[in-house]
């Protein structure tokens, strides 16, 4: 199967500005159209290993990024995100076009993929068992995820834990890891040789950049995993790494609060979330040093199934 890397940069830009690019990420096919060079640059760099699905008769999401007409094309230029022909969000500065693509695709999946319980969480896997890392912004979730996937864990997702309703398995959605502010420099130093998108400043999240997903994780995007641990991480400067057991009732409520569609799914959502909690060991985790965090998760992986 052809990948994004099979196209030259000129071919990629021409296709994206014209009929669009059919890109497969995990179980989803997205048709992307845009004439904006920075979006094509980001896809060429960070999605090089992902399959192209020109053979697919159906795309799950049809999205476009375009520049608004009128004076905004020249004065403080902007970008708008369109889904199925409709503009879904307020325009952002043109410099933020690639982050808007990432954020918009997250929105498409979290608000439309109701054959899954979708939780705002990173997910990593080892030996078929997955750690779900739900956390609010600023908790260090993505920094921890970025470190783990370069120290023996497979990336399933940085943002969206996709729990299949039919069997409770986690569907991989390996995409670039979103990092912001100080986390960008921390991971650059901690994991040498990683590939980042360019820095984008002054977004609603501060300075952001996206880390390329490991090629091995992308290649294994069809391999599901079962939930084994739910760990609520929190970065606290100067603290020792502490993994503390968490009562399952409390973990259930916290996980429900981090779900995008728990209430939409009703009974099916309740049952799916209950099954995740039933089969998972639940913990809170505070950390400051990534070395200590890596060691803690290595010990966690040795727990008997």
Image (tube, rainbow, N blue to C red):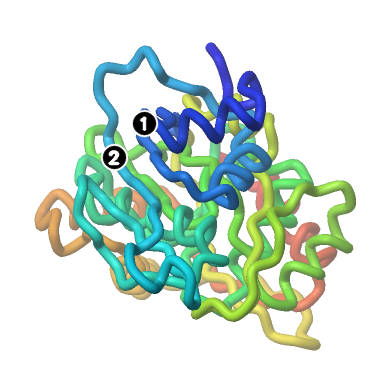
Q: Is residue 261 left or right of residue 41?
A: left
Residue under the point 32% across and 49% down: 109
Residue ID for mark 2: 61
Q: Quadrant of residue 248?
A: bottom left
Number of the label disc, if any, that sits on residue 88? none
Query: Mark 1 and 2 residues: CB-CB less than 8 Å, in contact?
Result: yes
* 77 shown above or below 106: below
Which secondary structure lies at badge 2?
strand
Q: Is residue 107 left or right of residue 146?
A: left
Residue ID for mark 1: 29
Residue under the point 46% across and 61% down: 100
Residue 30: % across, % down: 36, 36
Q: Is residue 256 left or right of residue 96?
A: left
Q: Of 298 and 20, which appears nearest the observer?
A: 20
Residue 106: % across, % down: 39, 54
Residue 279: % across, % down: 40, 48
Viewer can see residue 304: no
Q: Quadrant of residue 13?
A: top right
């Amino acid at each position: 199967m052809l990948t994004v890397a099979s196209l030259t940069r000129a071919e990629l830009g021409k296709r994206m500005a014209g009929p669009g690019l059919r890109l497969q990420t995990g179980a989803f096919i997205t048709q992307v159209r845009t004439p904006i060079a920075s979006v094509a640059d980001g896809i060429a760099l960070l999605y090089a290993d992902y399959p192209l699905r020109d053979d697919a008769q159906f795309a799950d999401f049809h999205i476009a990024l375009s520049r608004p007409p009128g004076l905004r094309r020249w004065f403080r230029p902007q970008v708008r995100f369109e889904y199925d022909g409709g503009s879904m969000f307020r325009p952002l500065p043109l410099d933020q076009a690639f982050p808007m693509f990432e954020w918009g695709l997250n929105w498409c999946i979290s608000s439309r993929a109701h054959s899954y319980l979708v939780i705002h969480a990173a997910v990593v896997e080892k030996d078929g068992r997955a750690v779900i890392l739900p956390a609010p912004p600023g908790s260090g979730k993505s920094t921890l995820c970025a470190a783990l996937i370069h120290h023996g864990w497979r990336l399933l997702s940085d943002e969206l834990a996709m729990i299949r309703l039919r069997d409770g398995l986690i569907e991989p959605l390996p995409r670039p890891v979103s990092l912001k502010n100080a986390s960008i420099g921390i991971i650059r130093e901690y994991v040498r040789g990683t590939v980042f998108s360019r820095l984008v400043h002054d977004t609603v999240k501060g300075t952001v950049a996206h880390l390329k997903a490991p090629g091995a994780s992308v290649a294994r995007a069809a391999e599901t995993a079962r939930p084994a641990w739910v760990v609520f991480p929190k970065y606290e400067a100067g603290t020792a790494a502490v993994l503390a057991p968490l009562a399952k009732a409390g973990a259930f409520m916290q996980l429900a609060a981090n779900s995008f569609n728990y209430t939409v799914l009703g009974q099916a959502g309740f049952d799916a979330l209950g099954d995740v909690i039933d089969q998972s060991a639940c913990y809170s985790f505070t950390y400051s040093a990534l070395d200590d965090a890596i060691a803690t998760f290595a010990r966690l992986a040795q727990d008997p199934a």
